[in-house]
Amino acid sequence: MSSLIRFTENEVDLSSMDTPSYIEIASYLIIACGVGLIVVCILGCCTVTCVKRVKCCFFAYITIMIAIVILQCTAAGLAVSYYSSFKNHGQNHMTRTLNQEYVGPFERENPISNTWDTTQASFHCCGVMGQNDFKTLQRWDSSWSSEQATIPVSCCQLTKDEFVIDVSKITKKADIEEKLKDPTCPVTGHQSNFRGCFEAVLENILSIRKWLIGTSMALALLELITIIATGCLFPRMQDVRDEGRPLSNTGRNM
């Protein structure tokens, strides 16, 4: 689906589809934060055992934690920004890709056309705003038996959800016909999906945005509490170790 969510405001240029979108970058940042947390855990263990000799462990721990918080806030910001941009410009971009690149469900050489078929089958949608988009689309292969299809087979409902993967592999009618709820669907439109893919994709992006923002903010808050707690405990741990007394004895004396 990446080629449909990577868009530009330029109505002619489709080269932006080679560049990751903000929502993809935000996901990568969250993954990077996860890797950073693993490093932080290792540094945390080192700080406890060698704090008397190596203060750099503590400062590295705090620095990485702050960097992770910044990355998570950035990821949340990118998710918010991308949703607004896609809501304003995504429909035009999807319309351009459909009009310029879609060649039908039996041609597998065009990756953008394949993406359209996969998206329509996966999200149970059809066209950008609905089935009417294919009435004005001239260059796609609408052959279906002896009749002309009015919608691609990827807009039709399947008997099982696991057959979605097969939609991106079909090269002829026989590959998919028996997996349709109604074999005449491409011609009659019976047992097909009516919702437009722009609405379906936008809904999916909204769901991802909520997950990214919620996860990022919850973890950032937890990490800020950890940073403050570590900053408060570190001087006390250092004083106790400098005095040569174990932490457990200090706890009993209190």
Image: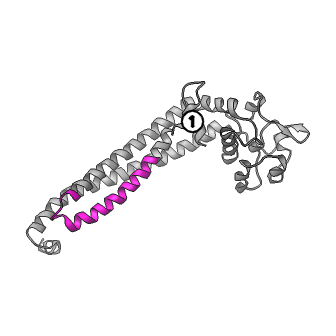
Q: Nearer the viewer, residue 169 or 89?
A: 169
Q: Count neighbours of disc 1 (C-alpha within 10 A) and say few if under 14, some if 14 to 19, many if 20 or more.
A: some
Q: Is residue 209 left or right of residue 227?
A: right
Q: Is 203 located above or below residue 136 in the figure?
A: below
Q: Which residue corresponds to mark 1? A: 17
Image: magenta residue range: 28-57
Q: Residue 51 colored magenta?
A: yes
Please name the residue shown 36% across and 60% down the image.
38
Q: Is residue 114 left or right of residue 62?
A: right
Q: Position of residue 60 (x, y in %)?
A: 25, 54
Check the image and tell me how it is coloured: one colour
Q: Residue 188 colored magenta?
A: no
Q: Is residue 94 left or right of residue 166?
A: left
**Where's the C terminus, which quadrant?**
bottom left
Residue at the extreme right of the image, as rendered: 146
Please name the residue shown 68% across and 37% down the image.
196
Q: Position of residue 251 (x, y in %)?
A: 16, 72
**Where's the N terminus, which quadrant?**
top right
- Image quadrant where residue 185 sits: top right
Q: Position of residue 94 (x, y in %)?
A: 63, 33
Q: Is residue 242 left or right of residue 48?
A: left
Please name the residue shown 89% across and 37% down the image.
147
- Image quadrant where residue 96 sits: top right
Q: What kind of secondary structure does the magenta stretch mostly adopt?
A: helix
Q: Nearer the viewer, residue 48 or 196?
A: 48
User: Looking at numbered disc 1 in the image, what kind of residue is underneath it?
Assistant: Met
